[in-house]
């Protein structure tokens, strides 16, 4: 189990370092806002994985979904109680007043984007790292955020990202549920049925302006592209059993699991 979690944490670090490098190389003018695209969506998935990795079971719900006729239970990590403990008051107010954010999961995912926009992600990670009481309350002992080496690598990437000006949308109903990429990166869950943009959006509140509907569709498409990019990114592959333990299960994302030497 310890080796499994070490591999997962190293993989998150590698993904974060690669996407940070790619993002910095793609930005020609650091004074211009960096909006939502495939690269920033992958960055967000990495940061979400950091926060949900080895979150205690008491903060993870299991929600049943039906896709392509198959019923399965997707873990739904809930970071909102933790976020309330470390956030600024104006952030909490802004997230609670969002038109399309209706769940604690949505507020949690929106918070990560808001903090990136404000250039404060590094500060919040440092604040959380200094609070051993909070870390112990919310995370298992082998969590990413309790790993000094992983957090050092994380801090280096956040320092580089602090040079950029992010302008990411934070008010989308798509954020009310988790998508596969961060959950898979964190080793929590991999879907056994294909996840399509239509399936992800299903059940969301898309009533509203045309621009909001377009934003939801764009987010859904980007997150599916990101999941595919992550699944193909490592040169050496392994099966779910070799990385996560247990018997391998056939999935449309079977190449997602990797090892590092």
Image (cartoon, helix red, strand yellow):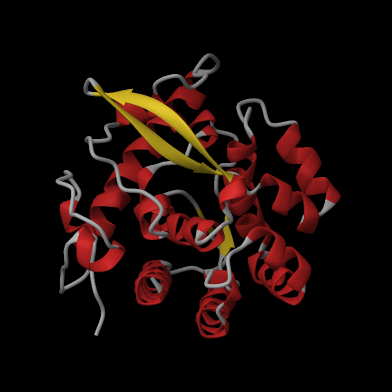
Task: Determine whether 250 is above or below 49 in the image.
Answer: above
Q: Residue visible at 74% across and 34% down?
A: 96
Where residue 99 sits in the image (x, y, percent)? Answer: 66, 25
Where residue 223 sits in the image (x, y, percent)? Answer: 36, 44
Q: Quadrant of residue 180?
A: top left
Can you see residue 8? yes
Where residue 46 sits in the image (x, y, percent)? Answer: 44, 61
Quadrant in which the C terminus appears: bottom left
Q: Residue visible at 53% across and 18% down?
A: 209
Q: Quadrant of residue 130?
A: bottom right
- Answer with left or right where residue 16 lies relative to residue 72: right
Query: Quick one: 83 or 141, which is closer to the camera?
Result: 141
Q: Residue visible at 16% across and 57% down?
A: 255
Q: Quadrant of residue 74?
A: top left
Quadrant in which the N terminus appears: bottom left
- The total number of labels drawn is 0
Can you see residue 233? no
- Answer with left or right where residue 136 lies relative to residue 89: left
- Answer with left or right where residue 156 lies relative to residue 258: right
- Outermost residue toward the top? 207
Q: Residue visible at 85% across and 49% down?
A: 89
């Amino acid at each position: 189990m310890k080796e499994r979690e070490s591999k997962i944490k190293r993989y998150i670090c590698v993904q974060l370092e690669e996407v940070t490098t790619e993002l910095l190389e793609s930005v020609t003018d650091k004074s211009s806002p960096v909006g939502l695209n495939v690269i920033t969506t992958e960055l967000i998935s990495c940061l979400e994985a950091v926060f949900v990795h080895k979150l205690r079971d008491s903060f993870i719900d299991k929600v049943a979904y039906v896709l392509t006729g198959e019923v399965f239970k997707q873990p739904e990590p809930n970071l909102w109680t933790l976020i309330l403990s470390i956030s600024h008051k104006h952030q909490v107010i802004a997230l609670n007043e969002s038109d399309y954010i209706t769940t604690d999961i949505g507020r949690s995912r929106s918070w990560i984007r808001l903090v990136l926009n404000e250039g404060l992600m590094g500060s919040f990670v440092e604040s959380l790292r200094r609070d051993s009481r909070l870390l112990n309350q919310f995370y298992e002992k082998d969590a990413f955020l309790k790993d000094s080496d992983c957090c050092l690598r994380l801090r280096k990437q956040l320092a580089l990202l602090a040079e950029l000006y992010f302008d990411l949308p934070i008010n989308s109903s798509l954020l009310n549920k988790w998508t596969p990429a961060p959950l898979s990166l964190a080793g929590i869950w991999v879907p056994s049925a294909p996840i399509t943009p239509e399936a992800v959006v299903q059940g969301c509140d898309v009533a509203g302006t045309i621009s909001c509907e377009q934003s939801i569709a764009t987010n859904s498409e980007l997150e599916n592209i990101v999941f595919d990019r992550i699944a193909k990114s490592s040169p050496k592959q392994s099966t779910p059993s070799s990385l996560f333990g247990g018997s391998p299960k056939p999935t449309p994302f079977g190449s997602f699991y990797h090892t590092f030497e």
